[in-house]
Amino acid sequence: MAARTETAEAAQYALEISRLFDAPPDLVFELWTTPEHLVRWWGPRNFSSTTEIFEFREGGRYRHLIHGPDGQTYAMSGIFREIVVAKRIVFTFAWDEGDVQGRFETMVTVTMAAEGDRTRLTFRQEPFADVETRDSHIEGWSECLDKLGVCLASI
């Protein structure tokens, strides 16, 4: 009788948000890839942000801080894994809290596709350990994308 090994992988939970912006893909890409634009929309409603590190190239690092209305600051960082101009940005994402060894890292994929004069942006973040952790990110990312739409409309 042949030896068997059976394993079960934990469920892979993903967050996906899609938006249609009244702007061409190159402009949407620019607002994702330049720190002076990022600080205008990165973070939930009523948060401001700063960028400490932004090495926009494959293998480059980033570190963003978001500042809440209550005075709290939250830091996140990661590495750019793939960049296709005006089409795709892939980067790791982790909150900078606690022991670096215990950080939970996800992968974010942002795709941009032209739909006439507009851009369909799809934001996907995965994997999350469970549905609760995934759902805890929905509001924040949705508000970021709302702010991105406001910035695009003002250019």
Image: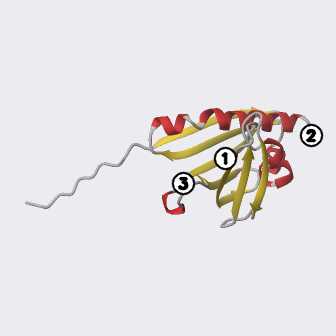
Q: Quadrant of the N terminus?
A: bottom left
Q: Nearer the viewer, mark 1 or mark 3?
A: 3
Depth check: give the residue in front, 73 or 154. Answer: 73
Q: CA distance from mark 1 to mark 3?
A: 16 Å
Is residue 26 in view from this perspective? no
Q: Nearer the viewer, mark 3 or mark 2?
A: 3
Q: Residue furthest left?
A: 1
Residue marked by disc 3:
105
Q: Residues within 10 Å of mark 1 (few under 14, many from 20)?
A: many
- Percent coordinates x, y for residue 120 in the rendering: 72, 37
Residue marked by disc 2:
155
Depth check: give the residue in front, 135 or 26. Answer: 135
Local secondary structure at mark 2: loop
Horizontally, residue 106 falls left or right of residue 69, namely: left
Label pair 2/1, CB-CB below 8 angstroms: no
Q: Quadrant of the C terminus?
A: top right
Local secondary structure at mark 1: strand
Residue marked by disc 1:
110
Depth check: give the residue in front, 50 or 143. Answer: 50
Quadrant for residue 55, please give it: bottom right
Label pair 1/3, CB-CB below 8 angstroms: no
